[in-house]
Image (cartoon, grey):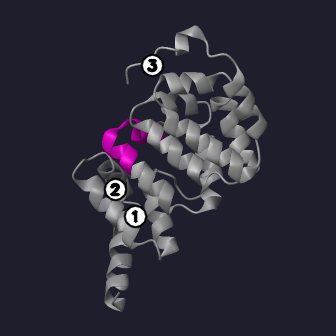
């Protein structure tokens, strides 16, 4: 890649993430025409960690000095068709250090998100990034146990698989996962839910 491209990309990223433009940038994440362009920006900036992180934080409305992204905004992104694709791209671009704050942001809402047609893919990407035992424990608290059968009822086998993969990677929750699948499936979970 020519050096001039890297410099121009950095200039574009800095302009988009400037404080006066950050709100407009994050709003573009919900637009079906601009979100794919922003996803390409993240892909192009993947080797420029500082730029990639700045774009991700701006898209999440995660200000400097704030412990986590704006929860209401992150939930809106996850539940929107264009926004959920954008959020998946953000999760791919973020470093592992930013996974814990995002998990904390979605804490208490993971089951709700996992049930949704679009947001369940965000949960899957979040589980793909969960590598530390505390991260997986947090997710198991919300999605494990009796909720596994419910997720299967809602045709969310991808979430269950991502959870199983996270448990295997971190070596946490494997026994609980197996026990949960051995329990009899409650009658209300036998008929698949129309998604």
Q: Distance between the residues labelled 1 and 3?
A: 44 Å
Which-is-in-front pick, marks 1 and 3? Answer: 3
Image marks 1 and 2: residues in contact by CB distance under 8 Å:
yes
The mark that comes first in sequence, 1 or 2, is 1
* Vertical side of 116 occupied by 98: above or below: below
The mark that comes first in sequence, 3 or 2, is 2
Q: Distance between the residues labelled 1 and 2?
A: 7 Å
| Residue placed under numbered mark 3 in the picture | 192
| Rendering coords of residue 90 (x, y %) | 45, 56
| Rendering coords of residue 137 (x, y %) | 73, 40
| Residue placed under numbered mark 1 in the picture | 17
- 10 Å neighbourhood of mark 3: few (<14), some, or many (≥20)? few
Magenta-tinted stretch? 73-85
* Vertical side of 94 occupied by 162: above or below: above
Q: In this view, does 89 lie to the left or right of 105?
A: left
Residue appearing at x 41%, y 61% in the figure: 19
The mark that comes first in sequence, 1 or 3, is 1
28 falls in the magenta region: no
Res 40 quadrant in image: bottom left
Residue appearing at x 51%, y 52% in the figure: 62
Q: Helix, strand, or loop for circle 3?
A: loop
Residue appearing at x 59%, y 23% in the figure: 149
Q: Helix, strand, or loop for circle 1?
A: helix
- 10 Å neighbourhood of mark 1: few (<14), some, or many (≥20)? many
Q: Which residue lies furthest to the top in this view?
A: 187
Quarter of the figure that contains the C terminus: top left
Label annotation for residue 25: 2
| Rendering coords of residue 119 (x, y %) | 44, 37
Q: Helix, strand, or loop for circle 2?
A: helix
Q: How far apart are marks 3 and 2 (CA)?
A: 39 Å
């Amino acid at each position: 890649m020519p050096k001039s491209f890297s410099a121009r990309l950095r200039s574009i990223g800095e302009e988009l993430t400037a404080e006066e433009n950050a709100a407009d940038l994050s709003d573009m994440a919900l637009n079906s025409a601009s979100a794919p362009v922003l996803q390409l920006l993240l892909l192009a900036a993947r080797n420029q960690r500082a730029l990639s992180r700045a774009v991700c934080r701006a898209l999440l409305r995660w200000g400097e000095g704030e412990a986590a992204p704006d929860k209401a905004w992150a939930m809106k992104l996850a539940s929107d068709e264009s926004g959920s694709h954008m959020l998946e791209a953000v999760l791919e671009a973020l470093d592992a250090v930013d996974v814990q704050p995002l998990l904390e942001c979605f804490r208490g809402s993971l089951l709700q998100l996992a049930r949704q047609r679009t947001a369940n893919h965000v949960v899957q990407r979040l589980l793909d990034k969960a590598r530390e035992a505390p991260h997986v424990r947090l997710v198991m608290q919300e999605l494990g146990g009796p909720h596994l059968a419910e997720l299967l009822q809602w045709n969310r086998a991808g979430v269950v698989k991502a959870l199983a993969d996270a448990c295997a990677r971190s070596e946490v929750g494997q026994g609980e996962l197996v026990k949960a699948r051995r329990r009899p499936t409650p009658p209300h979970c036998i008929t698949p839910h129309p998604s």
